Amino acid sequence: MDVSPSLYKITKRTGSMDTIKKRGNSAIGRLSDGIRRDKYLLLLLAPGLILTIIYKYIPMGGIVIAFKNYNIFKGIMASPWVGFKNFTDVFNSPDFMEVFTNTILISIYKMAVGFPVPIILALMLNELRNKYYKNTIQTILYLPYFISWVVVYGMMLSLFSTSGGMILEVFKLFGAEPFNILTKPQYFRAILVLSDVWKNAGWGTIIYLAALSNVDQELYEAAFIDGANRWKQLWNITIPSITSVIVVLLILNVGFLLDAGFDQIIVMQNDLVKRVSDIFDTYVYRTGLTRGQYSMSTAIGLFKSVVALILILGTNKIAKCFGEEGLL
Amino acid sequence: MKSRRLKTAYLILALVFVLSFFSGCGSASQSPTTTAPQTIASTAPQTTATAPQTTAPKVPDPLDIFISERWAGVGYDNMTVHYIEEKTDTKWNVTAVPPEDYDGKLDLFLASGERPDIFQNGEDIVKYIDAGILLPLNDYIDKMPNLSKYMADCYELKKDSRDGKIYSLPGKADTVDFTLLYRKDWLDKLGLQIPTTLDEYYNVATEISSKDPDENGKKDTYAFGARGFSDFRYFEHVFSAYGVLPYYNMLVDGHIVSGTIQPGAKEALKFLNKLYKAGAIDPEFVTDNEDRTDQKFKKGMFGATCNYYFVMDTANTYGYYKAFHDNNPNGVLVQGPALTTSGYTNIGMRSNGAAGWINHSVCKDAKHIDAAFRVFDWLATDEGQMFTWYGREGTDYKNENDMVVSLIPQDEYPKLGITQIYLLNDNLTKHFSKDYQTVYTEAQKAKTKAYTDGITIPETAKYQQLLKDYTKEMYVKMVVGDVPVDGGFEDFVKEYQKRGGEELYNAWDAVYQKRLSASK
């Protein structure tokens, strides 16, 4: 199996087994050899590991409240057990289908548009010769990532305002009657997707540019000598080099399918577009958390996590079938 | 050796990372707790071998208070709190939470086992009553004369319908907040009279929004704007003309029903839809929030709008008057009469109710109950109310011509904590200017009756917020025209009843009837 050069660099060990005195061939022996060789790396990893265990693994015990009718004054143990009732209540509620459809559709739209864009941008940036020009464009591209959605929405309100916003000029250009785009259900999902791409695409290009910079320049020179033009080089060298990175990021993104962007949607939602933009997280926030219905919120959260796990495992399996390394 | 130094460097770096994660630990963010008041420190006893010891200083009782922030980021370590501490021999430990996070944070606070002496709550009090953590207050109120007097006009209303016990003390405001206002200068410029009927109002509204009365060439004048339907009061001049108010419990044929689904509401929505299509309502009302509507009002964009009556107060209560007149030096605001329309009687404007717009309860297991009541009793006196509203006589305000005149600018209030404490709150109007007193009295004349004032039932927690959200959404759609009122309204009513409206109002009516027969 051909291991691409970029992947090789990422997984190369930093120390060799020869620099330590081996302790033997048993499993414990080999384990302790590995720890001794990598002890500083493990120490660096320690804080993040401890944090993950404390804040992600230990609280998993709380999942049990999804199967109880949790009363905060009684505590977890004394709250009554209700089995799957929370789940059936949620699935049978009149809003469930709508929320489920919204979540899936918005996620798919965002992936369809938002996944290729950083790749294309990275490929384009990679072709630039002038280093300063390239860095300036890169910085401008990823700056929106750091602006919070609250601020972005404020900017959008001013921009799209029918009483003095810049959008009025656009309407004048088309000779159309101005209307408030942010309240139209037929345009709202498009606005969600496009603003999300604007904000996050620049950040994604960094990862792909890093992968692209690892490609061996000699391959390009060899191809040039063989008479390949830029397009052929792109197709035969550049893209195969970053395929592994693309696959890894695709698997990760599929795991976020049911998330669909809470921060963005809770800020941008209004009454007129609620029907087309209510996702699991906003629904849970409004009807669950703000009314103290912790059991129902946990049930939906558990449902989302199980689905995400199935999707990640499935996508990973498919990637392996195609010959890629996969994530797990 | 180089590699040894490198190894040590890595080790130190790793250690720094580990320790930096612990820097986030510490007590949860709270408003700064009050420091010990100066007056107590001076009573340290003399310590000589032979001189007799003076009595040990009396340590003031600590008091744990959990409330929502009055002003964002402003703590409770100030003149007002220290004065009250001195007067009641207490030391306050205030935890203040931003209002939008209040319910969630309160639940977490109580769930972790904390039992504050005083905590603020609202319509969800049933949750805490059922959990059994609230102290019944009847006996305490009866024993304290000042508190008794304060509670006199709402004692019966505050009794829980199930066991007759009083579980919270109200911040009273048996008043109307909103009144109908017009830009008189615009009306004069356009040659219009102040409207008295809905048809006249329609005419005025459309003229204001189409004839550019502020003559700046931009289409930026409207009859009124709003904050979606999160605050129904901006539309109530229209609803009340049809004899209903949305999200209001009214009496029809002797029974409590929801104003939201009455036939009058349908007519009101039709009228609002007409107004919206004619361009008289600011189309951004769907996305605007409190800040934006306030800005727009102060900028002078609205000409026939409901708003707080105090925007007319020359004493610049809450800062509206000055801001409006700075931007519009020729602007003149006048009050308008309740609008009428044939076939309906105007029902008046929504009032807050004597049973309180804000409530404070005491936990049964709290540690300093007596101290809490000392504070409540002092606040219930005239002296207590005047102090929390206006500050120190002579320094912060003076009495002049039967009116309270503030001696310090309003922006100094947060630093001193004046008007920050709402633990008990009577509606004082002494600071209103004379001609504005008339505005206030006029506004109060249009008061509706709060039929279910003080009734607490478990169905409220289950359905009220859901129904309100659903109403907000459908009303906006009908006003804007996304859903046609004819047919759409009937579907809305059916769905409303199905989602809990029927259950909720049957419960409310049952308690109301019980109260009615008990008082006969």
Image: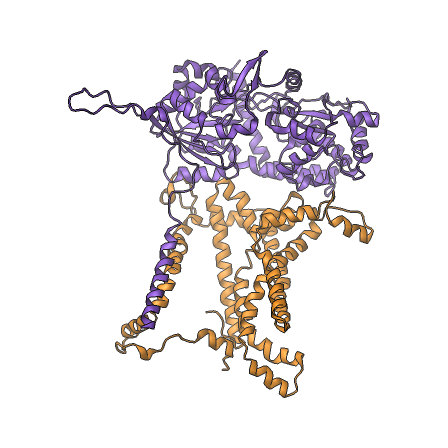
Chain colours: A orange, B purple
The answer to whether B207 appears left or right of B284 in the picture is: right
Q: Is residue B488 above or below residue B190?
A: below
Q: Position of residue A45 (x, y in %)?
A: 38, 63
Residue at (55% x, 36% y) in the render: B463
Question: Count of labels shown?
Answer: 0
Q: Position of residue B38 (x, y in %)?
A: 36, 26
B300 vs A94, nearest the viewer = B300
Q: Is residue B242 visible?
A: no
Q: Is residue B206 above or below residue B394?
A: below
B341 vs B253, nearest the viewer = B341
B14 vs A68, nearest the viewer = B14
Quadrant for residue B298, please give it: top right
Q: Position of residue B182 (x, y in %)?
A: 74, 26
Q: Position of residue B114 (x, y in %)?
A: 37, 36
Residue at the far left: name it: B50
Q: Is residue B221 visible?
A: yes
Residue at (73% x, 22% y) in the render: B336
Residue at (42% x, 51% y) in the render: A63
The answer to whether A28 appears left or right of A54 in the picture is: left
- Quadrant of the image containing the N terminus of chain B: bottom left
The answer to whether B297 appears left or right of A16 in the picture is: right
Quadrant for residue A128, please give it: bottom right
Residue at the far top: name it: B401
Q: Is residue B419 above or below residue A13?
A: above
The answer to whether B279 appears left or right of B59 in the picture is: right
Residue at the far right: name it: B191
